[in-house]
Image (cartoon, rainbow, N blue to C red):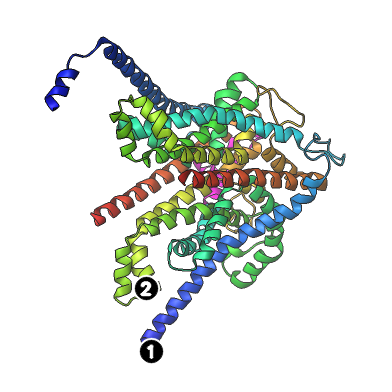
Amino acid sequence: MGQGTAERVVPVPPVILLHRRHRIDGDRIFQGLAITAGLLILAIAAVFVVALFIPALPAIRAFGLGFLTSREWNPVSLRFGALPFLYGTLVTSLVAMVIAFPIGIGAALFLADDARLRFIRVPLSFAIELLAGIPSVVIGLWGLFILVPLMRTSVEPFLNHTVGFLPIFQGSFSGSSFLTAGVVLAIMVLPILIALSRDVIRAVPRSLREASLALGATKAETTWSVILPYARAGITGAVLLSLGRALGETIAVTMVIGNRPEINGSLFAQGYTLPSVLANEFTEAVGKLYQGALFELGLVLVLITIAVNVLARLLVWRFKGGRESTTV
Amino acid sequence: MNRLGLRVLLDRIVTTLIIACVMAAAIPVFILLLFVLFKGLPGILTPGFFSDLPHPIGVPGGGVFNAIIGTLIIVGIASLLAVPIGTLVGIFLSEFGRNKVGDSVRFVSDVLTGLPSIAFGIFGYTVLVATLGHFSAISASAALAVLMLPVILRATETALILVPNSLREGGLALGAPRWRVTMQIVVPAAVGGIVTGALLAMARAAGETAPLLFTTLGNEFLQLNPGRPMGALSLTVFKNALVPYTNLQDQAWAAALLLVIIVSVTNILARLYVRRAQR
């Protein structure tokens, strides 16, 4: 039977040949189109890099590396330095991570646990996704009109009263401050931190968890000595990705930080960050050098966030690699 | 025995702490939404909010018609640019992307995802505003399109990879060429994930402010020409919040509420769609 079919198929009619050539062309066009689209992304990225460098060039030429270490920001005498903004960016992001880290990991542990309180976990996940979608300008508006007065009249005096022996909690209460910006940033990075750590914690093999519980460990002990050590690299990656988000957040921080290019040891002081000075002074910046200095701040910001992000991806990737090798 | 009691007590404390963390994460969301709702609702219900242009400072009343139209046009053009390209790149990654080119595209798109939104504003400014010599809505659309691309292409890739290989093999076995298998079998099977990615990207773009500051700049008047500066809802919120006039601040709250509604409805639609497509 097989031989019979083969005999009938071997002489290929010219119509099919034609059809087949046609078919190969379609595939080639399609594949070419897809590859072109992929290359387009790489081209956009290359243009992106150039587009970040070009407008910053006047300032790079004028100030060199001294730009990063100078504290002066004076548009009148045209002397510019990035240090106050670097400081502001790092301090606000650090405050944000200090607040968001414990809350985020705790919430992620809760959401990753399949056994507890299923009926409140679904609406909670939904609420957190909703928060992730709220535009930063809306959070900034809320921060400006609700959080800033609250910080000035209650939170800052309270902190000063209770832990005021620490120099970071001293000084006058302004409301618009490093601390307020940090709180706003913490609220903004929580959804991404929770979502990423939840996925990492869920990826811890069930067998490890069950083995620990079977050996008589309590849930808390299992979490502390089995789940968290296993998920450490992945959680570090999640924290770094959230940190990258916090470093680059612009609008909400601009609205609550007070916009003062100064380095001050107190968290109650007004400050400035890299993205917020860029957003704020961009429209009023006249002259190539002033604009160039602002764009160089943007460039510095992008380089920092890329470094943090790449590090984070490497960690998450290593975590995934580790997981595969254990399950095999 | 005593030691066991201690361990159980510790377990209880940790459980309580974890629930406290959940509360600490969820409560700000509700406070925030309640404030936006109560402070924005009166403004939204004011007659003329949707249909009037902003009044000059000091003149009460006025609306955000220009900003609503501006947001729709800017995000519309950005989506027209980003959705087809993003989907195509997603197809490339899943069907032809197991090589060096595919890996570098993935890497670049991950880096783009992590960039601060203000960087896209600088990109739009240098590439379009500086070369054209003036601010325009189309440069905002271009900046937002680049911001949307990584979201769309990763969502498309993920959705396509989830399509079982047996479907592809079935199509190829029936004699269909690769492109027809992809376009008529694989993509339709994954359309839920693709649409969700596109909607999520649009929601994110609609809420962005920083890229717009550098590209479209804002406009108090109605502008329908994408080659000119346009207003946008997010810009209205930002600018009106920072002026010391209560009627403008009320308008900022109302515009914020409208923005939250637009973004949340898009987000919820996206999730509902993927659920329906999975069924």
Q: Is residue B172 above or below residue A186?
A: above
Q: Chain of mark 2?
A: A
Is residue B160 placed above or below A321 in the rendered structure?
Answer: above
Q: Which residues are magenta?
A: A66-90
In the image, farthest residue toward the bottom: B1
- Regarding residue A285, the answer to whether it shows in the image is no
What residue is drawn where x is 46% and y is 77%? Answer: B12
At label 2, the amino acid type is Glu
Report how far apart the C-alphas of labels 1 and 2 lie in the structure: 17 Å
Which residue is at a point 37% across and 85% down the rendered structure image? B4
Tell me what residue is drawn at x 56 percent, y 67 percent. A166
Instruction: Write down the chain letter for disc 1.
Output: B
The 10 Å Cα crowd at callout 1, few under 14, some 14 to 19, many 20 or more, is few
Frontmost residue, B167 versus B33: B167
Q: Residue furthest right?
A: B59
Q: Of the numbered discs in the image, which one, if any, rests on residue A221?
A: 2
Q: In this rendering, is residue A63 above or below A214? A: above
Check residue A82 for magenta coloring: yes
* Relative to B180, B76 lies left or right: right
Residue A149 in view, yes or no: yes
Residue A87 location (% of width, % of height): 54, 49
**B266 displayed left or right of B174:** right
Residue corresponding to mark 1: B2
**SS for dot 2:** helix
Query: Camera-side residue: B1 or A232?
Result: B1
Q: Nearer the viewer, residue A123 or B100?
A: A123
> Where is the N terminus of chain A found, in terms of image quarters?
top left
Q: Position of residue B128 (x, y in %)?
A: 58, 23
Q: Is residue A204 magenta?
A: no
Q: Secondary structure at mark 1?
A: helix
